[in-house]
Structures are given as C-alpha cells and as structure tokens.
Image (cartoon, helix red, strand yellow):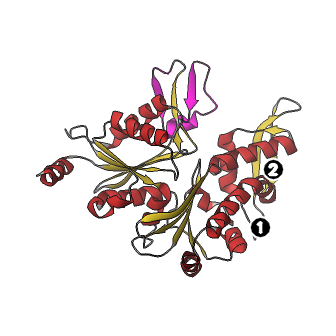
Amino acid sequence: MFKILDYIIGFFSRDMAIDLGTANTLIYVKKCGIVLNEPSTVVLTSDGGKVIAVGKEAKEMFGKTPKEIRAIRPMKDGVIADFDVTNKMIKYFINRVHDRGSFVRPHMVIGVPTGITQVEKRAVIDSALESGARQVHLIEEPMAAAIGAGLPIHKPMGNMVVDIGGGTTEVAIISHFSTAYGESLRVAGDEMDEAIVRYIRKNYSLEIGSFHAEQIKMRIGSAYPLPEKLEMTVKGRDLLKGVPTSRVLDDSVIREALREPIQAIVDVTKRALEKIPPEMASDIYDHGVVLAGGGALIKGLDKLLHEKTGLKIIIADDPLRVVVKGAGMVLDNFAELKRVCIN
C-alpha cells in the first residue's frame, strides 16, 4: 500500500537531485536531466530582509556592491555557513525548476562532503525541508561522482575517486556500494584562488579580488609545466601607489602560486593509497584514479598526480557535473541504489 502511494506521489512530483556546492549549485530533475547550474551566491539588503539577486547575476555583483547591500556565498568548505541565506538560495533555485502547479513536494537527493558532521547533516536536511522537500536523502559527493563516472561501485573491488570542488577535496575508495576509505580536505578551488591573491599581493604589490583570481586560475593556472607559455593581463590596485594598474603574468607564476594547495591535494591522495589493503591497492593500480570536480580541469594536474603516484589518472567526462549526474542516477534508480545514501 505504501509503495503504491509513494509511486503515485512520485508520479506527480518533480523529484530532484542537488549538488549543493561551495562554488556552484546544480539541480537534476527526474526525467528531465540537469536543469540548473548556477553560482552559490546571493545578494541581499544589509539587514538580510530582501533578496536582490541569486546565482550568476549575484556573482557578477560580487565585490561591486554599495554598503546598503551585500553579496554572500552561504556555503563554506562544502557545508552550510549561513543557514538563513542558504535557505533563501535553495528556495529560489527550487522555485525556478519545480512546477509550482504540482501539488506534491519533491523528493530530494543531495550531495554532501565526506565526513560531514551530524550538525552539518541536520542543517542541509532542514534547509531542504524548509525549501519544500517532502523527503531528503544525503549522498557523499565522491560516491555520487563514482556513480556519475560509471565506476562499478557494486563490485567488491577498489574504485578510487578524487573530487576537487570549490570548498573541499574529497578522496574516497569505494567497494560494493560503500566507502572503504574516505577523507575530506578543506583545500580546493577557493583555497587556490586565495593562494593566487596572496602570491600576487606579496610578490607584485598588486591587490586583486577572488573573482579575478578564479579567472586567472581557469585561464593560465597549471600544476605541471606546460608545452607552451600562457600569459594573461592581471588587473588590480597597486598597493604602493594606490591606483588601478595591470601586469602581464605567465603560467609559471601562477603555478608557483598554486604550489601549496596542489601539494596538499597530492598528499591527501597518497595518504589514501597508503591506508588501504593491498588487494584494493592492486585494483586501483589496474584501473586508475578518477578525477572529478572543477579542480580536475587544472592544467597538468593529472600528469602531476601520475608522476607522484605512478597510477593512471582519468579525468571524468564532464567533471563539473559528474556529482549531480550521479546523484540523479540514484534518484532515478532509488530502490536499487538507496543503500549508498548516508542517512
């Protein structure tokens, strides 16, 4: 009886999977695919009462708002840092993709970092419920990435994923529907941006914003020497003269700026390999390591990891969307895959 009722409810609902990321929020709607990919950014009045912009429009205002309004990224290190603003953001995104003509609240599967605390889990669930969900299930992001990348998680063999997002780098070895080893490192895309800001300030007396640093990272950032030099004009404020100025920097400068966060990612990957049974290590040697998330697109990172580990490094197809794709596959095949959820 309950299964029949749940089927009927599901038929009338626009169930969805959400990758609630530090940098971007992606939503997959059942039977529709990925319908939203927006920055996790909100602009609202200083008293927090009125939302002025959300997503891409809000990100374009970052660092450019007057005193009476403020731009906020309510997610930090992969978890909710500002509950009220996250609530507003999720409600806005759900209203955009959910058919409000539907009288049934959606079932949601949401990706979260490995090792998330009970308090952080509760914050995500409460935020989703207050935003209109009828039922919420959480899935660890590397598990979702493994499913989205098509790894055989159902087999008793080691499958290794390194998911480098905006706030966290998630490393997991997955076997037979569960995580045999997992570690979450709070060094990822945002820390890379800040490393670029600090390096350029220290070595060139040039102050730039985090949004510009992200653009620099994407255009000329690298983890390994490139076959051809890349250059970019970097604009900011001269700290000595106090006026706007620009400098032309090349990939070798940004590679040096990224050295510490990249090394931290290499270290956490190697640490995972040191802590697993030799049988799983053998599987990973045979099948390689899958890179997911926006950090997977850092030029030469796969080469550096191969050099440091001796393993085959595979960049997932569409690494920016592989987590929400995997969460969507769980949603579509929930009876079969619900065991991978952590709540």
**Residue 225 disc label:** 1
- Callout 2 touching callout 1 (CB < 8 Å): no
- At label 1, the amino acid type is Pro
**Any magenta on residue 17?**
no
- At label 2, the amino acid type is Val
Task: Tell me: residue 116, above or below residue 265.
Answer: above
Q: Residues within 10 Å of mark 2 (few under 14, many from 20)?
A: few
The percent coordinates of residue 203 (x first, y second) are 87, 45
Q: Which residues are magenta?
A: 48-73
Give the farthest residue toward the right. Answer: 240
**Any magenta on residue 72?**
yes
The percent coordinates of residue 51 (x first, y second) are 46, 26
User: Which is nearer the eye, 268 or 218?
Assistant: 268
Say which quarter of the image contains residue 22. Answer: top right
**Residue 188 disc label:** none
Task: Tell me: residue 65, above or below residue 269.
Answer: above
User: Which is nearer the eye, 28 or 226?
Assistant: 28
Q: Nearer the viewer, mark 2 or mark 1?
A: 1
The residue sitting at 66% across, 64% down in the picture is 271
Task: Tell me: residue 75, above or below residue 301.
Answer: above
Side (left or right) of 318 relative to 299: left
Side (left or right) of 100 relative to 34: left
User: Which is nearer the eye, 97 or 198?
Assistant: 198
Name the N-terminal-most of marks 2 and 1. Answer: 1
Secondary element type, mark 2: strand
Q: Residues within 10 Å of mark 1 (few under 14, many from 20)?
A: some
Residue underneath mark 2: 248
Q: CA distance from mark 2 to mark 1?
A: 18 Å
Secondary element type, mark 1: loop
User: Which is nearer the eye, 183 or 216?
Assistant: 183
The percent coordinates of residue 300 (x first, y second) are 69, 67
